[in-house]
Amino acid sequence: MMRCSTIPDGGPIRWEECSFERIAAIRDAGIDMAILPVGATEQHGPHLPCGVDSFSAEAVAEGVSAATGVPVLPTLRYGCSPGHSRKWPGTISLRPETLSKLVLEIADWVAAAGFTRLLILNGHVTNWAPLRCALENIRSDLPSTRVALRSIWEISAGIRAIYEYDGGTNWHANDAETSLMLHLKPDLVDIGQAIDEPNRAACCFFSYTVDKESRTGTVGRPSTADAAFGEELLSLCIETLADQVRGALAEHTPLEDWDDQSPDLQSAVRPAIRRRTLDGDL
């Protein structure tokens, strides 16, 4: 496979660093997939830079690219962050519909270049809804494109547990994110300013903006962060997602892979599941 001259062999393939001839060569060599990292520019407490979500998504995407040869598109550094309010300077947000439309238009041009598989790699929690809408529109408007959406903390159940242990599903600028930044961008972290905050919204019925949940914009325990843990977490994210991407490069549609002679496994287990449910075991 041809790589851009500015990238060492085995390093990430950055779309913007390639000529059109090299992009065509990558495609013609059988790599018909691209990765789109989507981050955000928003406050991350008093101790972290506003680019945490972009730095994280980009680092994972580039690690996967280096491991698989799949090119990485330029990172989207603006996301859907209105829930962080305007209390803390630094946040710059798109409206949900703007982000969704932007991703659809990018996907259209990726498809025009002959890449029929697209992984949207998300680094910010509240990007998920507009990105999911983008996925639906891509499936409808670009039927030849196979599209996947993954958030870096949802690459596996184990990775999700690491992110959520100190802040539940409401974590922000916590141990995991701070550890990643201590590994990736240590010069941008002021760990002496890290303030631990509980997940005050854990039992709430309604959803609130961050300024109504946290005094500092943090949820979790950033004071426990360390660079070694961040390095381990990044490696786990890259290795796990790279394995998934290798499989995705050869994936067919479910009907193409389905053997009509295979037993109906759902029929086999359904009576047992129903009985356990009725008996109160589930």
Image: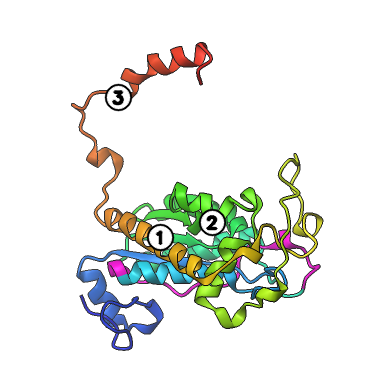
- Circle 2 packing at 10 Å, graded few (<14), some (14-19), many (20+), is many
Magenta span of residues: 67-88
The residue labelled by disc 1 is 236
Instruction: Give SS at disc 2.
Output: helix
Earlier in the chain: of badge 3 and badge 1, it is 1
Specify whether residue 173 is in view: no
Quarter of the image for residue 197 reads bottom right
Question: Which mark is nearer the camera, 2 or 3?
Answer: 3
The residue labelled by disc 2 is 131
Q: How far across and down, in percent of the image, does residue 240 sit?
A: 36, 57
Instruction: Give SS at disc 1.
Output: helix
Query: Which kind of residue does numbered mark 1 sit on?
Result: Leu
The residue labelled by disc 3 is 265
Q: Is residue 35 left or right of residue 154?
A: left
Earlier in the chain: of badge 2 and badge 3, it is 2
Q: How far across and down, in percent of the image, does residue 218 sit?
A: 71, 62
Earlier in the chain: of badge 1 and badge 2, it is 2
- Circle 1 packing at 10 Å, graded few (<14), some (14-19), many (20+), is some
Q: Is residue 29 left or right of residue 215?
A: left
